[in-house]
Amino acid sequence: METVLNEKQFREDLRGMLIETGWSQSRLSKEAGVSQGCISRFLSDEGAGMNLRSFDRLCPYIYGSQRPAPAEPGQPEEAQHVD
């Protein structure tokens, strides 16, 4: 079975990653090398797209090897980075 990732699913997965890990858009922006404005526009505007370069840079943080560990309650964002 082939899995198809569409824009709506990617947007939901990105939101879920931010919530689950406690990362801010700014933190993800710095880690992935994608502008915070790009992330913000994509999450806030259902009609906003994202270029392939930004998509490629974000995917490892959402689905792959760079995905941060889930946040622990009360843990500061800075302490959540997984090396």
Image (cartoon, helix red, strand yellow):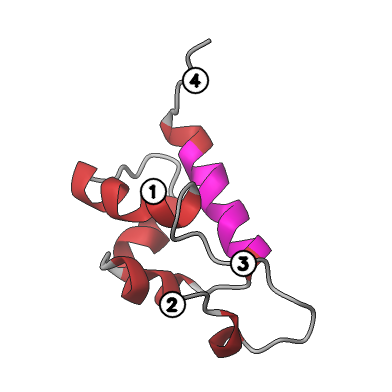
Instruction: Give the class, few, some or many, for how many residues have Cα within 10 Å of label 2's Cα (few <14, many ≥20).
Output: some
Between circles 3 and 2, the one closer to the viewer is 3
Instruction: Give the class, few, some or many, for how many residues have Cα within 10 Å of label 1's Cα (few <14, many ≥20).
Output: some
Between circles 2 and 4, the one closer to the viewer is 4
- Asked if 36 appears above or below 6 in the picture, the reply is below
Q: Helix, strand or loop at disc 2?
A: helix
Between circles 3 and 1, the one closer to the viewer is 3
* Residue 52, percent from left and from top: 22, 42
Left or right of 66 on screen, residue 38: left
The label on residue 59 is 1
- Which amino acid is tagged 1? Cys
Left or right of 73 on screen, residue 36: left
* Residue identifier under label 2: 27
Are the residues flagged by discs 1 and 2 in contact, CB closer than 8 Å?
no
* Residue identifier under label 3: 69
Marks 1 and 2, how far apart at CA = 15 Å
Which one is in front, 44 or 25?
Answer: 25
Which residues are the magenta region? 10-20
* Residue identifier under label 4: 3
Q: Helix, strand or loop at disc 1?
A: helix
- Asked if 59 appears above or below 61 in the picture, the reply is above
